[in-house]
Amino acid sequence: MARWDSLSDDETQLLETTFWTAGGSRHRMAGRLGFSKSKANALIAGLVDQGLLAETGAERSSGGRRAENLQLSADLGVLLGVDIGATSLDIAVLRPDLTVLAHHAEPVDVREGPGVVLAVVRKRMRELLAQSGFGARQVIGIGIGVPGPVNFDIGQLVNPPLMPAWDGFSIRDYLRDDYAAPVFVDNDVNLMALGELWRLKRSLANFLVIKIGTGIGCGIVCHGEVYRGATGSAGDVGHICVDQDGPLCHCGNVGCVEAMAAGPAITRMAIQAANDGQSATLAAQLRDDGGIDALAVGRASRAGDAAANAIVQRAGSLIGQMLASIVNFFNPSHIFIGGGITRIGPLFLAAVRQSVYHRSLALSTRQLEIQYTPLGERCGLIGAGVLAMHETLKVRGVAP
Amino acid sequence: MARWDSLSDDETQLLETTFWTAGGSRHRMAGRLGFSKSKANALIAGLVDQGLLAETGAERSSGGRRAENLQLSADLGVLLGVDIGATSLDIAVLRPDLTVLAHHAEPVDVREGPGVVLAVVRKRMRELLAQSGFGARQVIGIGIGVPGPVNFDIGQLVNPPLMPAWDGFSIRDYLRDDYAAPVFVDNDVNLMALGELWRLKRSLANFLVIKIGTGIGCGIVCHGEVYRGATGSAGDVGHICVDQDGPLCHCGNVGCVEAMAAGPAITRMAIQAANDGQSATLAAQLRDDGGIDALAVGRASRAGDAAANAIVQRAGSLIGQMLASIVNFFNPSHIFIGGGITRIGPLFLAAVRQSVYHRSLALSTRQLEIQYTPLGERCGLIGAGVLAMHETLKVRGVAP
């Protein structure tokens, strides 16, 4: 394993830039960092010697000279990425360049508390490491996403509404016996934003990632960095009011978009439609499966069921109404929508778009793009890897 | 006049830091910039020699040694700051440390177009400069705030709803014949945010400034910098919907907070109350003056008029409802409210606070402070000075 206990500022910067712009050439790297060609060459040679950087996929440029592509060396070790959702768990072992070496997904219920859920996480981590031929000592950084507000500095959840048993629990301390590597914890939607920021090689400076599943949350990228707010709760958009006469939400207010348009609300509307005789398809689904999730509503909608269409349309429209306020305020260039809702199909996205473009000011939407997260279901997991590598570089880059 | 055509990066940084943290000592300055004491001393000596920096208010520290306070030298020249509101104009000549040397305010109507308004601006600039003993050649930077969306890079208004005649007009070109100094144009609320950021010596990283007058706008400070959005329209919160069944707004949508709670809406509610016989005070005001502005409603409210109180309460509550959405999304540490509305009195602020604390999540409001802008009515003008000095330093700091 390569050693990197005392990197200079310039070396750290070079590793950081390599991580964020993977596959870049020496030449472009020097330009980006404002280093002279000779300085960049000397730094790169040193880092390659130390086993921190690798040159791969050497391509013959038009002039016949080799234009080596740089990336973080696999000799550095591996990362562990964990994406804990309200009802799902995703874990992966990743290379420093975020290639996934091993991956495992299973359902969990975060309400069972940190003891139960983290015991599963710990076990799967060991299995996945063994499976990919690594041990705990080769792990250089661990990134974990959780579905609640996080105090990022201490890595603890703060008053998480969906998972009260986790309040103040230290995931970091829990894993300390198993791994010497640093552990970083962040809100799941912030990780999705980090994931997309990495995919984009930081080419967009101001965009949003909305996760819609059991709840609704928003990751914010501002001035090219993930923005967490004054007390770490930025992006808590699920409780924005979209109807002053709407139903009561578990937060105590009425008409919150989460209570009216997230997964459970879609299920509720579908059961109502089934019971009211508005849809034979939904009624059959309810009878056969004993329940109707958003996925089933999406299937019925794509098959042309009018009631299912109306439900998808209504949910998308309410979410678009909430987003319209945010677009007027924040003027993002892109909104990426992720989470379980994306499986519902294209009609939902169309309804969101229509509602946003209708309600926001023309100037804010002139160049606005709204689409599903390009990283798809892997968005949070890749984000966990980005968190692990990015923050580990920051920690390691400090000379002792 | 001092010369500063080719400053080094370090020198520019030192001048910038001096500007933002006026009155700091050499010692603290070196610490802030990460310079060694000897490097800072050499740079400062050089800049003092060139007439760019001045040491003032030398204080005897407890140990008996002098701790000189640094500020930008008055020898640099002067700044022109202009704050154009929908119905008002404020102009000042300022020293590089933002001491106001001469100030003039008068009513204008921006709807009369750039030709009429800028002719007044040009005339007042000359008069104020003469009054403070300076000429056009001593002006080093000009900052101008306008009540509409601005493309900051080219300094032009883009589709301004309140002032359509200004669309695409170049204020910069208009003033080019009079001044060699660079001209910077920004939205008026962004300037208020810049003003408060400077007053705070950048000690807060994430806060909002809301201006409520004829319209409603918001200046955003994020990661310690003014945030303008992907296409420059960030903070356009006046058209956030607070009532799906609300009145039609000039933007084409219904229930916009601006149409329901800004100055004209307050006037409309007051005239209605006067005509409906709900308030003898407001009826008398309408009879005597032929109109009722927000100021008069505030006076009636402070005198205990129940109908005026209800109007102030309703406007504050609607604005608080809009802010609650933004607080959930952005999680700012402070919201500063400015503009004409502040003259209405403390009941308005109380209504805003109550509404925000009621509707936002506890985690977002735990440390949130909502108050009137500490810089008061000078907020925009000081902001224009900050824009002029800050951007001029950026432009000048580049070696030719």
Image (tube, coloured by chain):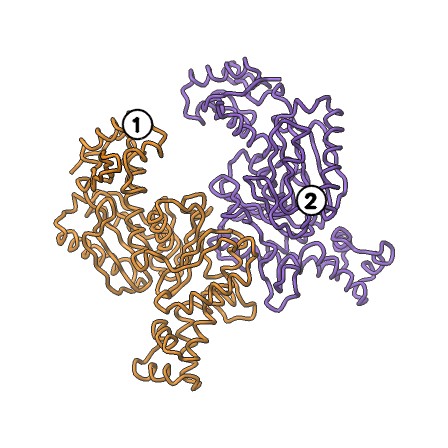
Chain colours: A orange, B purple
Give percent across and percent down for residue A38. Answer: 28, 25
Mark 1 vs mark 2, foreground winner is: 1
Q: Quadrant of residue A75?
A: top left
Nearer to us in this view, B1 or B46: B1
- Give the residue at x 74% y 47%: B112
Could you say whether the residue bearing mark 2 is in a helix, strand or loop?
Answer: loop
- Give the residue at x 23% y 56%: A121
A285 vs A198: above or below: below
Q: Quadrant of residue B133?
A: top right
B83 vs A112: above or below: above
Q: Which residue is mark 1?
A: A37
Give percent across and percent down for residue B246. Answer: 64, 66
Q: How many marks?
A: 2
Do the CB atoms of the residues marked 1 and 2 lie less than 8 Å apart? Answer: no
Distance between the alpha carbons at the discs numbered 1 and 2: 51 Å
> Quick one: label 1, few (<14), some, or many (20+) residues within 10 Å?
some
Q: Residue furthest right?
A: B288
A59 vs A214: above or below: above
| Residue A327 horizontal side relative to residue A4, left or right | right
Q: Which residue is mark 2?
A: B85
Could you say whether the residue bearing mark 1 is in a helix, strand or loop?
Answer: helix
Quadrant where the C terminus of chain A sits is: top left
